[in-house]
Every structure is written in structure tokens, then in C-alpha cells.
Image (cartoon, rainbow, N blue to C red):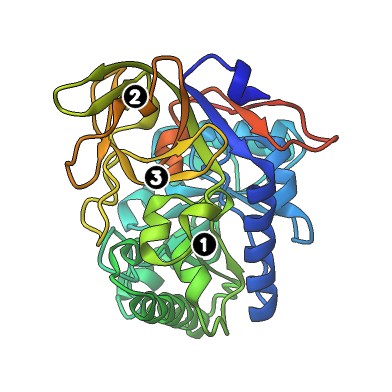
Amino acid sequence: MPIQTAATPALLVDRTKLEANIRSMAERLDALKVPLRPHLKTCKNIEIARMTLAGQPGGITVSTMAEAAYFAGHGLEDILYAVGIAPGKLEACARMMDQGVELTLILDNPDTARSAVEAAGALDRNFSFLLEVDSDGQRAGFVPDDPALVETARMLEQGGCTVAGVMTHAGGSYACRNTEAIAQMAETERATVVAAAAALREAGFEAPVTSIGSTPTATFARNLSGVSEVRAGVYLFQDLVMAGLGVCQPEDIALSVLTEVIGHRRAQGEVLVDAGWMALSRDRGTANQDTDQGYGLVCTAAGEILEDTIVRATNQEHGIVANRDGEPLDVREFPVGRRLRILPNHACATAGQFSHYQVVNRGRDMPEVLERCGGW
């Protein structure tokens, strides 16, 4: 098993928990009668991607051109590139379309639309776009009653591009303090895209796509009428930020970093491990939540959570394990060589530090090591 043999630090994924998380989201959206277009920026792996697509239409969401190329190379060709398109990437997009990829792009301002129209003419391509709308004031985007929304759509259409619809991401849900607030954010997210799509349709555009997405809002939405698809990604693994929001329990987190005790700070009652911020990331997403998990929550090698034992601080390659309340640990319980697992604050950021996963509880059809695509 990886927990005994893997060189540390190592990225572990627990298949049993992964499958449970995938099943839970699928059942949730099935009850709301909306399909899933999974956001694969979190997993970056084809085997896991195929697990998420079981029973779904087959479209995926990515955040990098490298992800798009990787998944297209494995036969997933209905791809939404869900980052505002940089004009310098449009030539690469055209090449990908020439290879048979059904690629949809997004933009959120008329300046980018002008660049897209110029590129469409120069490259003789019909680029397909979703217009991003701002549902929470956290990022750029059109608002439904802004005349620029329709004007930009008209500019794209007249320039030989397709306006497929609208999309939004309620990133503000990550700052909510309780599940009722997340449910309200989910309704705001839904209402915003529905209103934006209505504005486009009134102006003569079909705008069939109304795409929303975040794991918290997907989890707590009560009504998704008018929404054509949901994008979510971190739900696959869950993490401590999601646990702090009430989206999951720490026991549901499928991702962890395997580490080994390498020393002690005996006077302080603290333990040194070989997983620093290069392994855990610098993400401190729980710092403003009710429970601050430091740089990660500590578990035994078997995955049993050691309550209130966290990675208090990190250096590049060192983690400092301590009690949350500052009381000294009994370092005799953490001898040099003992293996531990760290649950991450932010699954995307922590997984991004590694080139592959080691699989715990793997099935017959899943290899022990899973690659992760990288780059942009």
C-alpha cells in the first residue's frame, strides 16, 4: 500500500471516499434535474474524469489549455474552457478545433470580444462563446441589465462567432458563514444567469446555455429551474474549506498528503514532518472560518483524524505539527519515521503541487498510480 511504500511527501486519493463524493453530487443534481459538466481542474486525470462522467452528457470544464489538450487526447472533446479567453490563445484554440474538439470559450468584456472577432476573421473560424455574468461581485463580468451584454453578443455574432449563452461562478459562496447563506447565494447565482439569458433572448439570440457552478452552491441549491448545466469540481475530493462551510465532513475528504516525522521541537512540544508549503501549498483558506485548520489537519497513516492536531506552520520543505490550542504534544507519540496524513485546506492548490496520485483502496480497474496533467 502507498502509505507504507511511497516516498514522502506523496499525494494520496482514497477511492472509496472519492466514489462516495461523486455519487452524492450526481444524486443531488439528478434530484434537481440538471446535468453536470464536471470541472476537471481539480482532478486533472482521465480515470477520475471518467468516473465523474458516468450518467452525465459527457461535456467537461477545464481551466487551462493544457487540460483541454490532455482530456481531448483521451477522447473527451466537448470542452468548456472556463477562464476569460486571452486573445493570444485563440490561435491555439483554432488548432484544437481543427482536431475535432467542440471548444467553448468565455469572455466578459467588449474589448476581448473585438479581439475575438479579429482573430475569427484572420483564422477563418467560428468561435463559440459563453458570456460571463457577475453573480456575486467577486469577479469581472456583465450584469444582466447592462446594455453591454447584448451589444457584445451582437458584436460577436456579426463578426462570425456564436453566442451559445451565459455562465457564472458564485465564488462568493466560499465566504458564506452558514448553509442558509450558501442556499441564498445559489438562488442569486441561478437568478443572475436566467435574467442574463432572458435579456439575450429578448434581443433575438437563442442562448440555449445557462451554466452555473461552484461546489457549495451545487450542494445547497433548492431550485435550478432555468439552468441548463452545473459546473463543480472540488466536490470530487472535498477539503477543509468545504468542511468549514458545511458542505462535507472532514471524514469525507478523499485527498491527503502522506508525510513522515523527521524531528521534534521538544521544548515547544511540536513535531517536524517532511511536508512543507511545497507539498501542502500556502493556501490558508480556513483562517477566516470558525475553525482554523492551519496548513492542514493531521491524521494517522490509516486516515484516522487526530482531533485538534494541525500543521501550525510551514517552511518550504518542513511542516510543524502542533496542537491547535498551543498545548505541547507528547512527542513520544510521534517518533521519527512515523507516517501521517494531512488533509488539505484547498484540494486544488494542494493537488497542484504533485505530478501524480497514489491510490488507497484501489479497485481492480484503477491503477495504483494516477498521473495528473500539468502546465497551462
Q: Which residue is drawn at 63% across and 80% down?
A: 32
Q: Which secondary structure lies at badge 1?
A: helix
Residue at 52% from the left image edge and 56% from the top image edge: 129
Mark 1, mark 2: which one is toward the viewer? 2
**Left or right placement of residue 335 versus residue 223 in this view:** left
Distance, label 1 to label 3, CA atoms, is 39 Å
Q: Nearer the N terminus, badge 1 or badge 2?
A: 1
Residue 330 shown left or right of residue 226 in the figure: left
- Mark closest to the chain's N terminus, 3 or 2: 2
Q: Which type of secondary structure does the marked residue at label 3 adopt?
A: loop
User: Splitting the image into 4 quarters, where does residue 30 fall?
Assistant: bottom right
Q: Position of residue 99 (x, y in %)?
A: 72, 33
* Mark 3 vs 2: CB contact within 8 A: no
Q: Mark 2 points at which residue?
A: 332
Q: Residues within 10 Å of mark 3 (few under 14, many from 20)?
A: many
Above or below for 182 versus 213: below
> Local crowd at mark 1 within 10 Å, few (<14), some, or many (≥20)?
some
Instruction: Confirm whether residue 124 shows in the render.
Output: yes
Q: Can residue 233 be seen in this view?
A: no
Q: Nearer the viewer, residue 164 or 283?
A: 283
Instruction: In the rendered structure, find residue 157 and report the number of the disc placed on it.
Output: 1
* Residue 292 picture location, percent across and down: 25, 51
Q: Pinpoint residue 265: horizontal percent, then vertical percent.
A: 20, 20
| Residue 19 coordinates in the image, percent (x, y) | 69, 52
Q: Label 2 near label 1: C-beta < 8 Å?
A: no
Residue occupied by mark 3: 346
Looking at numbered disc 1 in the image, what kind of residue is underneath it?
Glu
The residue type indicated by label 3 comes to: His
Amino acid type shown at disc 2 = Arg
Specify the quadrant of the image occupied by residue 224: bottom right
Which quadrant would the N terminus be assigned to in this image? top right
